Image (cartoon, rainbow, N blue to C red):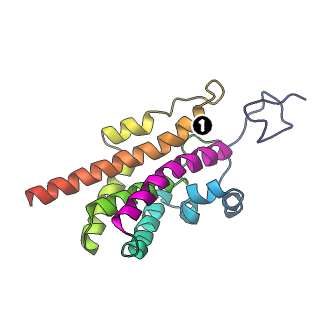
Amino acid sequence: MQTDSSTAQDVPYRKADAPLDPIAPTSRFMMAHPAHVLALGFGSGLSPKAPGTAGTLWAWLSFALLQNRLSDTQWGALIAVSVLLGWWACTITARHMRVMDPGSIVWDEIAAFWGVLWLASPMEFWGQAAAFALFRFFDAAKPGPVAWADQLYHGVDPATDPAAWRKAGWGIMLDDLVAAFCTLLVIALWRVWW
């Protein structure tokens, strides 16, 4: 029996022309690989409704718990490492789920919203709530540059492009980073004009 070399590690004894079905994430799937745990936001991405919102809420809660415990340098390092590690985790998890941009991957929301909260600080609760609402708007509605970033790597094909999953992993992270930038831009304009 032949195997497809691009997916041989996933299903070793399948016919080359047999389609692979996407894998729905479960807690068992999440615990099967460290990249899954990270990409699925320590379980927040397993939310049956609005996993992106659940991941952003997880980011907000964890930021609130760590806000006064980390220096600006530590926050900057944490966010930079989160983006790079997130690229890796999103790449691995998307490939294992066999979906280019699964909604249950929420590490992109977490790393990006940490950046919003850190760069826009200091903010009281209502300022953070407004930042949350703005970020969710940009991430869900995907206006302008966010839509561009979201679609940038959606056309890659793992069957013809050996780097397709790495591109998909970066694409998962990129649209949320652009949504974070748009959120910060609105906050900055608000602070200048009011």
Q: Secondary structure at mark 1?
A: helix
Q: Above or below — where is 102 with respect to 136?
A: above
Q: Give residue 58's position: percent from left, percent from top.
A: 46, 67
Taking the view exactly as shown, the residue that stands out farthest to the left is 193
Residue at screen point 62% across, 49% down: 93
Please indicate, yes or no, whether residue 47 appears anywhere in the rendered image. Answer: no
In x, y percent, where is residue 55? 48, 61
**Part of the protein shown in magenta:** 71-98
Question: Residue shown at 16%/53% (left/top)?
Answer: 189
Does the magenta stretch mainly form a helix, a strand or a loop? helix
- Expressed as whole percent of the image width and height from the top left, the position of residue 9 reads 78, 40
- What quarter of the picture does the N terminus occupy? top right
Figure quadrant of residue 30 = bottom right
Frontmost residue, 56 versus 80: 80
The verdict on residue 75 being magenta is yes
Q: Is residue 125 visible?
A: yes
Task: Tell me how many marks there are.
Answer: 1
* Residue 158 versus residue 59 in the image, above or below: above
- For badge 1, the amino acid type reads Trp
Residue at left offset 78%, top offset 32%? 18
| Quarter of the image where one finds residue 13 | top right
Q: Considering only vertical position in the picture, is 122 above or below 5?
A: below
Q: In x, y percent, where is residue 51? A: 50, 59
Residue 29 highlighted magenta (yes or no): no
Q: Residues within 10 Å of mark 1 (few under 14, many from 20)?
A: many
Residue ranking furthest to the top: 160
Residue shown at the point (57%, 40%) measured from the top left: 100
In the picture, the quarter occupied by the C terminus is: bottom left
Q: Which residue is mark 1?
A: 165
